[in-house]
């Protein structure tokens, strides 16, 4: 048992209390004090002392000092708690109380491998030294001054100064008095000093209140709400890192962020892993920088009421309209409830009409007044629509005529016709390419021109009243080749416009473009070569549409075409998934379906491939099962 033990001062770090014990014990050496306190020659760490319960058992009971009190008021654990998971926090707390059994407590706390670790030297504020000496008769080491990233004392606004005492010597020696010899410190501008004071104030507030705050799981929830309300995170959960990085640089400045190695050529790459990792090595400095940027202060971040983000896929108040043309309740609000599900990276809302059975989905929010027009993504056409398809086939209507009557794609009409036994899919397969023994024959430009011109003239002769879009549906290869390679001849021999000279019927063109683009998208997706990214230029070229498609859509002339492309163009993730499925199929046929060969074939950068590993393994496994 110890005969006495000093009472800790406000914000005194645990090591400083031990130093004052050593001073008053009149021990001849630090070794003797370590034996008194810990029953061993080396002492304990600065920021992460361990086995504190063993020491408190030696302290006289009238001192009313417990391990929990020391950890709460004299260590940095309250500052760590909001940024480490509950399980990790319990592990660190147990190690500080009962010892580490040989394991590094810094590693358990997440400080190992961290760019900002424990400072190399003990630090102090000259004004605090003067005040402490005046009030308590002696100076002591403050825990706030020893934190990484703290350069300015928040109480006095003065710069923290490094002493000549190395942190590496603290387990063998005690330094109860502040030395006069101090190292020179950096000189900061007034703007940088003010921002460093923000940082110190936030660290101090969390030190004093961290014990009452939640763990990192709760901090993540606050991050999620604020990032969404400020426009830095999609409702689907995907972060807008470019926008976030630019805003952080503008808020702090490049010079300030460089003090913490947080600039990275303007990208602030630390934002990505800081918001993704939940139970790995963290960076305390970066968390404090992000909190100040998002909320104005740590107190506002943790204690204030934050605006709640919008619910995913807001469509206004129910009921919602049926979009089935054949339903007697078409465009009437009869859908009372929608089902919202979350996929890998996006939300999806399913709308089911109780009167016709049609199911359509939306993956983006849309105001109630805009839900009565535009394209919808049909999942199931419903029983009423399917019955009408049967009636039309019984009446000997062609798939093309049915697609016109029901406002669906030609391939959709063919699909249902085959499903109900009215058609054979073999009759609608793509025309075989000119090939000999599997190798495509090469045709000269002159031969191609003659061939396609004759084919076009035969087509017009057989269909004298057909419009251009109808001729395209019958011979799209011929149409595309002529419009791209023989435009002048094509214009002279194509059906004339039914509108006046110089006048464009944009509604008719909108409908025409949708039919052309649907077929083009289906052709691209059906190709057995390595999938290409489906973009506006690529699908427009495939459809034989002019180069002004994007301009016409930007001017609002083609709303249906715009809606169709919005739902059918590839995101990079969708493109990557198509490439993965293609590679799995090819490699399986070749008998060498392995991950390493798949990565070579798809040529996806590692940072974009790694998040898709789950999809890759599922694709490989499903094909193996088949």
Image (cartoon, rainbow, N blue to C red):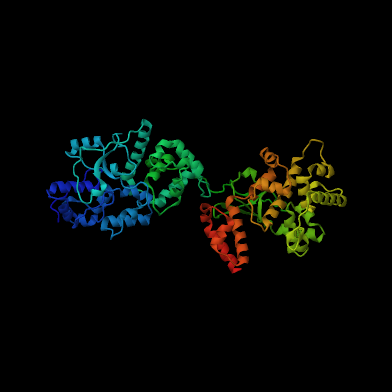
- Would residue 527 appear left or right of 19 to someone viewing this image? right
465 or 453: nearer the eye?
A: 453
From the image, which quarter does the N terminus lie in? Answer: bottom left
- Would residue 53 appear left or right of 609 to someone viewing this image? left
From the image, which quarter does the C terminus lie in? Answer: bottom right
Q: Taking 618 as reference, is 404 above or below it?
A: above
- Would residue 279 appear left or right of 561 to someone viewing this image? left
Q: Taking 362 as reference, is 551 above or below it?
A: above
Please indicate, yes or no, whether residue 231 appears anywhere in the rendered image.
no
- Seen as rendered, the residue at the extreme top is 190
Residue at 74%, 40% in the rendered image:
506
Residue 71 image point, x, y percent: 27, 51
Please indicate, yes or no, whether residue 510 appears anywhere in the rendered image.
yes
Residue 254 image point, x, y percent: 43, 37
Residue at 56%, 58% in the rendered image:
600
Q: Taking 478 as reference, is 581 above or below it?
A: below
Residue 30 image point, x, y percent: 17, 50
Quarter holding residue 433: bottom right
The image shows a total of numbered marks equal to: 0
Residue 509 image point, x, y percent: 75, 43
């Amino acid at each position: 048992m110890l005969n006495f033990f000093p009472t800790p001062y406000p914000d005194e770090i645990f090591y400083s209390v031990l130093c004052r014990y050593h001073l008053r014990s009149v021990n001849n050496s630090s070794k003797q004090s370590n034996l008194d306190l810990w029953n061993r020659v080396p002492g304990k760490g600065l920021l992460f002392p361990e086995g504190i319960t063993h020491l408190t058992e030696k302290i006289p009971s009238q001192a009313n000092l417990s391990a929990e009190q020391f950890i709460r008021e004299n260590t940095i654990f309250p500052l760590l708690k909001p940024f480490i998971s509950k399980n990790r926090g319990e592990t660190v707390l147990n190690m500080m109380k009962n010892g580490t059994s040989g394991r590094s407590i810094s590693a358990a706390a997440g400080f190992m491998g961290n760019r900002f670790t424990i400072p190399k030297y003990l630090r102090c504020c000259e004004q605090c030294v003067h005040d402490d000496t005046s009030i308590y008769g002696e100076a002591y080491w403050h825990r706030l001054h020893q934190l990484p990233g703290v350069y300015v004392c928040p109480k006095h606004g003065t710069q923290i100064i490094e002493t000549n005492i190395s942190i590496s010597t603290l387990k063998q020696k005690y330094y109860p008095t502040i030395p006069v010899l101090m190292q020179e410190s950096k000189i900061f501008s007034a703007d940088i000093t003010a921002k460093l004071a923000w940082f110190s104030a936030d660290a101090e507030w969390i030190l004093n209140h961290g014990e009452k705050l939640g763990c990192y799981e709760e901090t993540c929830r606050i991050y999620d709400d604020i990032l969404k309300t400020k426009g830095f995170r999609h409702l689907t959960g995907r972060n807008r890192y470019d926008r976030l990085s630019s805003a952080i640089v503008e808020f702090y400045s490049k010079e300030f962020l460089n003090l913490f190695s947080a600039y990275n050529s303007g990208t602030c790459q630390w934002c990505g892993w800081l918001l993704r990792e939940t139970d790995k090595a963290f960076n305390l400095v970066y968390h404090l920088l992000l909190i100040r940027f998002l909320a104005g202060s740590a107190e506002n971040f943790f204690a204030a009421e934050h605006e709640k983000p919008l619910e995913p896929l807001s469509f206004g108040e129910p009921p919602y309209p049926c979009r089935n043309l054949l339903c007697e309740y078409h465009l009437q609000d009869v859908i009372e409830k929608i089902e919202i599900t979350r996929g890998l990276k996006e939300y999806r809302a399913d709308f089911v009409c109780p009167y016709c059975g049609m199911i359509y989905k939306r993956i983006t929010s849309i105001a109630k007044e805009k839900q009565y027009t535009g394209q919808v993504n049909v999942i199931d056409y419903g029983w009423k629509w399917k019955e009408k398809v049967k009636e039309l086939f019984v009446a000997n209507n062609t798939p093309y005529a049915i697609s016109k009557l029901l406002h669906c794609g030609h391939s959709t009409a063919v699909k249902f016709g085959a499903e109900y036994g009215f058609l054979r899919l073999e009759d609608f397969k793509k025309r075989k390419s000119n090939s000999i023994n599997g190798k495509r024959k090469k045709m000269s430009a002159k031969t191609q021109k003659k061939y396609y011109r004759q084919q076009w003239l035969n087509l017009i002769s057989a269909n004298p009243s057909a419009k251009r879009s109808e001729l395209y549906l019958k011979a799209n290869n011929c149409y595309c080749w002529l419009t791209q390679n023989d435009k002048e001849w094509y214009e002279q021999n194509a059906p004339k416009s039914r509108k006046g000279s110089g006048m464009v019927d944009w509604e008719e063109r909108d409908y025409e473009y949708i039919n052309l683009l649907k077929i083009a998208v289906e052709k691209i997706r059906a190709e057995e070569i390595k999938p290409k990214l489906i973009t506006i230029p690529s699908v427009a070229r495939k459809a034989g549409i002019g180069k002004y498609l994007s301009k016409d859509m930007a001017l609002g002339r083609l709303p249906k075409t715009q809606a169709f492309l919005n739902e059918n163009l590839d995101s990079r993730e969708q493109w990557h998934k198509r490439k993965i499925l293609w590679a799995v199929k090819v490699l399986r046929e070749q008998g060498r379906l392995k991950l390493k060969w798949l990565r070579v074939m798809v040529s996806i950068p590692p940072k974009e491939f790694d998040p898709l590993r789950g999809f890759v393994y599922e694709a490989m496994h499903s094909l193996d099962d088949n």
